[in-house]
């Protein structure tokens, strides 16, 4: 399970990550990353935790398949939170092929997308 402080829930946060962040596409998913930054003028301000959200549409499959894909993606992103910049917003959008993919294939695509967005900094 992804901790509460690391969950992306508000529509505005999803929109910020998708519209203002960088994007890396892979065959099974698309990752949007908006790197976090603290306000240098705010005294004692620390970066908020990295937050992640997921978009899994009906094109991926039925409800059971969509929930399976979301659970797998939550598990994978939880393991990679420490390698992302503090305060980042991450949106992972599953593409239709993700419903047929296994855990290892999703992990490979997620790692490749994050590596591309971070410039080689993830596994």
Image: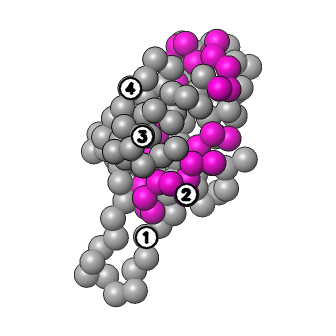
Q: CA distance from mark 1 to mark 2?
A: 13 Å
Indicate the position of residue 16 as horizontal and vertical percent values.
34, 47
Displayed quadrant of residue 102: top right
Question: Residue sitting at 36 percent across and 41 percent down?
Answer: 117
Q: CA distance from mark 4 to mark 2?
A: 22 Å
Looking at the image, which is closer to me, 102 or 97?
Answer: 102
Q: Which residue is mark 4?
A: 25
Q: Which residue is mark 2?
A: 82
Looking at the image, which is closer to me, 31 or 105?
Answer: 105
Q: Is residue 104 left or right of residue 109?
A: right
Indicate the position of residue 97 as horizontal and vertical percent values.
55, 13
Displayed quadrant of residue 14: top left
Q: Which of pointers 2 and 3 lies earlier in the amino acid sequence?
A: 2
Q: Which of pointers 1 and 4 lies earlier in the amino acid sequence?
A: 4
- In the figure, 69 relative to 90: above or below? above
Q: CA distance from mark 3 to mark 1?
A: 22 Å
- Which span of residues is magenta-colored? 75-104
Q: Which residue is mark 3?
A: 115
Indicate the position of residue 67 as horizontal and vertical percent values.
69, 27
Q: Is residue 42 visible?
A: yes
């Amino acid at each position: 399970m992804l901790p509460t402080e690391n969950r992306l829930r508000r529509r505005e946060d999803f929109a910020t990550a998708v519209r203002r962040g960088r994007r890396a596409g892979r065959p099974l998913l698309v990752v949007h990353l908006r790197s976090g930054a603290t306000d240098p003028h705010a005294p004692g301000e620390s970066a908020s935790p990295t937050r992640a959200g997921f978009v899994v549409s009906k094109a991926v499959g039925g409800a059971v398949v969509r929930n399976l894909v979301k659970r797998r993606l939550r598990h994978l992103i939880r393991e990679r939170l420490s390698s992302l910049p503090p305060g980042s917003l991450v949106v992972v959008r599953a593409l239709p092929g993700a419903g047929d993919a296994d855990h290892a294939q999703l992990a490979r695509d997620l790692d490749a997308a994050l590596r591309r967005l971070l410039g080689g900094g993830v596994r």
